[in-house]
Amino acid sequence: MAATVAARGAPKASLKHRLAERGIDRLLLLLVPGVLALVLLFVYPFLYGLRLSFQPQQGSGVFANYRTFFTDSYLRDTIWITFKLALPAALINVLASVPIA
């Protein structure tokens, strides 16, 4: 019997022990789906949009889109309109949620 065990090698360690040898906690693996969803739904689209913003349509330089955005008064005014809408909404959300928390 001992010869057959030696021929097969030592029994394989469980997944828990193999992960512990590498310094990975089993519960840490529960983060993988959440991190993957975060990367797929938020980080990738952000980086893709950032990359597109540096590719001008006219071929006039890397920062051409940004130069156009900040020199055109209509486009620059859209920032202030956005802030005028977003800041009160954010303040109302914070004022309503802090007492509940």
Image: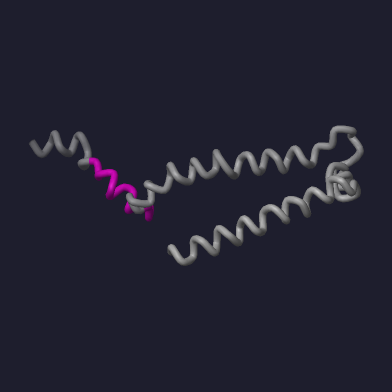
Residue 88 figure quarter:
bottom right
Q: Out of 38 and 12, give the one closest to the viewer.
A: 38
Q: Which quadrant does the N terminus fall into?
A: top left
Q: Which quadrant does the C terminus fall into?
A: bottom left
Q: Out of 12 and 48, give the one closest to the viewer.
A: 48
Residue farthest along the bottom direction in this orientation: 99
Left or right of 32 on screen, residue 50: right
Q: Position of residue 46 (x, y in %)?
A: 65, 43
- Report the residue at 38% width, 51% height from top: 28
Q: Position of residue 56 (x, y in %)?
A: 84, 37
Colour scheme of the rendered structure: one colour
Q: Give the residues drawn in magenta, as a range.
A: 12-24
- Report the residue at 55% width, 62% height from top: 94
| Magenta-span inclusion, residue 83 | no
Q: Position of residue 72 (x, y in %)?
A: 90, 46
Left or right of 8 on screen, residue 49: right
Q: Position of residue 68 (x, y in %)?
A: 88, 44
Left or right of 36 on screen, residue 43: right
- Report the residue at 32% width, 53% height from top: 20
Q: Out of 91 and 24, give the one closest to the viewer.
A: 91
| Magenta-span inclusion, residue 14 | yes
- Report the residue at 13% width, 36% height from top: 3
Left or right of 95 on screen, residue 1: left
